[in-house]
C-alpha cells in the first residue's frame, strides 16, 4: 500500500474501501495494491456518484462508482490523522 501524504488527484479509481475510523483506501486501475489516506473520524470527505455500497467487515465498506471510475481530489497534511477534504465523483 502506498500512503498518501501530500495533496493529490487520483483518476481511474475502481472502488474505495472505507472504515469508521476515517481511513480510505483507493483502488486505481492498473495499479497493484491500494493508495491509503489516513484520516480521522471527523474528516471531511464526500463521495458522489456511488452506485452501490458493500459491507465487508464490522466497520469497513466498499463504494463502487456509478460510472466506470471515480476521480478523487485528496488533501493530505501528513501520514496520519488527516482532516481532508477528500472529494470523489464520476466524470
Image: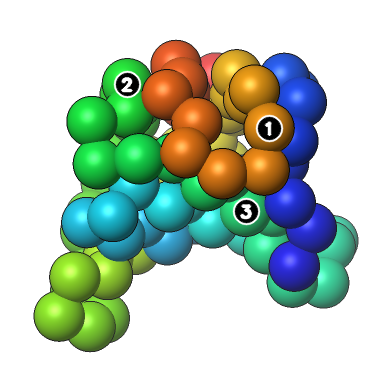
Which badge, 1 or 2, comes first in the chain's sequence?
A: 2
- Judging by the rendered image, the residue that carries numbered circle 1 is 78
Task: Give above or below for 84 relative to 29.
Answer: above
Q: Nearer the viewer, residue 28 or 74?
A: 74
Helix, strand or loop at label 2? It is: loop
| Marks 2 and 3 in Cβ contact (< 8 Å) | no
Q: Position of residue 18 (x, y in %)?
A: 36, 56
- Report the mark closest to the observer, 1 or 3: 1
Q: Residue at x 34, y 47 (%)?
A: 22
Quarter-wise, where is residue 4 in the image? top right
Residue 46 against residue 11 in the figure, above or below? above
The residue carrying mark 2 is: 44
SS type, badge 3: strand
> For the residues carrying marks 1 and 2, which lies nearer the camera in this image?
1
Where 54 falls versus 86 (above or below)? below
For the question of whether residue 26 can be seen, the reply is: no
Which badge, 1 or 3, is on the more N-terminal residue?
A: 3
Q: From the top left corner, tell me how far across and down residue 39 is, in percent.
A: 44, 40
Q: Is residue 86 toward the left or the right of residue 26 in the image?
A: left
Alpha-carbon span between mark 1 and mark 3: 12 Å
Pick whichever of labels 2 and 3 is earlier in the sequence. Answer: 3
- Disc 1 and disc 2: Cα gap in Å? 15 Å
Disc 1 packing (10 Å; few <14; some 14–19; many ≥20): some
Whole-angstrom CA distance, mark 2 to mark 3, is 16 Å
Q: Residue at left 72%, top 20%? A: 7
Task: Give x and y (percent) for residue 36.
Answer: 62, 53
Q: Which residue is mark 3?
A: 36
Q: Where's the C terminus, which quadrant?
A: top right
Residue in the image at 26% along x and 81% along y = 56
Amino acid at each position: 500500500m502506498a500512503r498518501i501524504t501530500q495533496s493529490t488527484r487520483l483518476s481511474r479509481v475502481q472502488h474505495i474501501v472505507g472504515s469508521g475510523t476515517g481511513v480510505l483506501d483507493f483502488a486505481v486501475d492498473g495499479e497493484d495494491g491500494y493508495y491509503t489516506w489516513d484520516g480521522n473520524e471527523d474528516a471531511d470527505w464526500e463521495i458522489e456518484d456511488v452506485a452501490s455500497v458493500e459491507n465487508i467487515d464490522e466497520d469497513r465498506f466498499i463504494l463502487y462508482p456509478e460510472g466506470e471510475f471515480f476521480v478523487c481530489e485528496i488533501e493530505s497534511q501528513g501520514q496520519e490523522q488527516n482532516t481532508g477534504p477528500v472529494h470523489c465523483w464520476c466524470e
